[in-house]
Amino acid sequence: MVKFNNQYVNREISWLWFNERVLQESADKNVPLIERLRFLGIFSNNLDEFFKVRYATVKRIVEAGKTGKSVLGGEKAKDLLEEITEIVIKQQSKSLVILKQIEEELERQNIFIIQETELKDGQKEFVKQYFLQNVSPQLMTIILNDLTRFPTLKDTAAYLAVKMIIKSDNSKKEKRFALIEIPKGIDRFVVLPKDGDKNYIIILDDLIRFCLNNIFTMFEYESISAHMIKITRDAELDMDNDLSKSFIEKISSSVEHRKISDPVRFVYDKSIGKDTLGFLKEKMQIEDTDSVIPGGRYHNKRDYMGFPSLDRNDLLYEKIKPLPVKGLSIEGSILESISRKDYLQYTPYHTFTYILKFLREAALDPKVKTIKITVYRLANNSQVAASLINAVKNGKQVTVQIELQARFDEQANIEYAEQLQSEGVKLIFGVPGLKVHSKICLIEREEEDGLKRYGFISTGNFNESTARIYTDYTLFTAHDSILKELNKVFDFFETTYKINKYKHLIVSPHYTKSTFSKLIDNEIANAIVGKEAYIKIKMNSFTSYKMVDKLYEASRAGVKIQLIIRGICCLVPGVKGMSENIEAISVVDKFLEHTRLFAFANAGSPKVYISSADWMTRNLDYRVEVGCPIYDEDIKRELMDTFEICWKDNLKARVFSEKQDNAYRKTKPPKIRSQFETYNYYVNKFKGK
């Protein structure tokens, strides 16, 4: 059971239980088999990022000699580190059991993941040739014994720790230790030639193990063994204060420094020899505040996200065809359509093409004078970036606010910033002390009756790759009052000392917390006098204790509250006298739930908003976020419909409770899998049903 101090669940512990829900997907036999392996990869990748960021933050609190209770939900930082390690060890053990079960089921499907000792003669020759041609040229091998300084290991890279017992005439055996870095530029899973209808795969680690003799030919050894290790480093960016450096230079330097930042987790194959483990820990100066995790034979299970499909579509999710938005044609002028009414794009159920169409049309339209957009994460070879460059070449004034501190995308954004700048795009590098997380675009077009604005406001990144798996809302609008305020947000990026006022938009860091608090107060007042009062919220994470307290206050006043929170939830629902009017669920399924929706009864005249912001302290106080009201009644109804579909999920919804046990929600038939039902909803909507 998760520990909490009656009112709050600690955010780190809640996050680990979110990742447990991902692990549940890998264990679910109703999930296609190869997809289960990929969920195991997502679980591992999530854990890597957790240690780089959250564990590293708690460790810093300990090293500063502080308890951190006020920011950690009442837990002491030192106790929390121990609790995290304990939970992670259990989850890692569970993941190994699940992996073994999946491998057994793969074998029943004639898919065999074999080790180096199981290679047949024909396969051995293939492996030797593959090693010589593809692996050996990229291999980095370091002999450790005679080094005065231990090499700097790369963050979350996988290494084979090699021990050789050297042949000797005397009784004392010499031990030699070495490290082999598993190359990242080669697929982790090597598909061997088929044998009839049987598929064989060897993991790159085992392929290297098979060829150890080829690597260490210069040593005469009696025995040789190789076991996997990896470390995770603190990913916090320590910014340089040198005023002579540009912002891009400072971010670049900080990203580079991340490569040698302090380790926070050391994972090793639990079958490794004690002498090898002791040698490594001593040389690497592993500390008591680091999380030391015994694991299985293979690490970096995140690579399972790229497990080969082997043309086995029966073992994969059926791909859905993204739908058109009803009434919004890709072929005609999108600006002309938006000038008449608002439209909602809900990816991946709708095609992402509308955003690209909007930008391409704006880039070519002679009447469009300016384009302004925020960028947080772009796809590789981004068509969004290409459209913006195209617009500049057509004489448009293009302004891009690019967030260089987007976690783990800093290097990619630096490269895009340099490319855009070289093409003549005007770049803005954010607001001192704040990240720009808003997802907004505004264009200005010279028309017969004067300047007219068009734009879109989204809950997710303008990224055509993630749009295939992330659920996100994008509102296309020509509503002049909203777009004038959107222009104020862009003005704020350049004139940060000027705090604008907004009548329509909800903008962090100045107004999000206070505006939502007022909306909650309105529901409280209505509940007290017997008017209709409810709050329906869908977010990624909920960690702001102040907003948790506000919902507790609303619950005590009789406001009915429904929360759909994919990830962290520090609120404890269903507690008598505190939160008995609050229900909360999490949906983890095929797509990553990323939408943010806020709905308030408002005594029978609902107010509905979409936003880029979760209710986390960072989103409310330390980021520029934009929330937008929905005025179109059809779109408002559509948003409420899809919320209700998600709320009724009884196949992939888990219930938040005092137990915090990730129990699946059980309700009466019919069975509802919300992501599939949402797609059907839009199919029927497009057909006019």
Image (cartoon, helix red, strand yellow):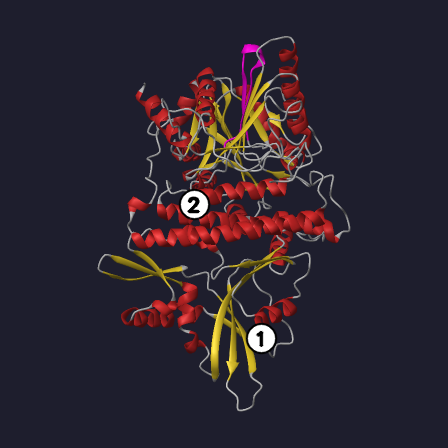
Q: Quadrant of residue 362?
A: top left
Which quadrant of the figure contains the N terminus? top right
Point out the tag, 2 or 1, that comes first from the N-terminus. Answer: 2
Give residue 101's position: percent from left, percent from top: 40, 51
The answer to if 341 sits in the magenta stretch is: no
Residue 425 appears in the figure: no
Q: How many marks?
A: 2
Is residue 680 found left or right of 504 in the rendered image? left
Q: Which residue, given by chain and number where applicable, does mark 1 sit on?
A: 144
Q: Between 321 and 270, which is closer to the camera in this rendering?
A: 270
Q: What separation in Å lies between label 2 and label 1 (alpha carbons)?
A: 40 Å
From which residue to which does the magenta span run? 595-611
Outermost residue, left direction? 196
Asked if residue 630 is positioned above or below residue 570 in the image, the reply reads above
Is residue 454 found left or right of 620 in the rendered image? left
Asked if residue 28 is positioned above or below residue 481 in the image, the reply reads below
**SS label for mark 2:** helix
Asked if residue 168 is positioned above or below residue 650 in the image, the reply reads below
Mark 1 residue crowding within 10 angstroms, few (<14) / some (14–19) / many (20+): some
Q: Between 103 and 156, which is closer to the camera in this rendering?
A: 103
Q: Between 541 and 569, which is closer to the camera in this rendering?
A: 569
Outermost residue, bottom direction? 169
Q: Which residue, given by chain and number where applicable, does mark 2 sit on?
A: 27
Which quadrant of the figure contains the C terminus? top left
Give residue 236's position: percent from left, percent from top: 64, 50
* Label disc, if present, on residue 294 of the rendered structure: none
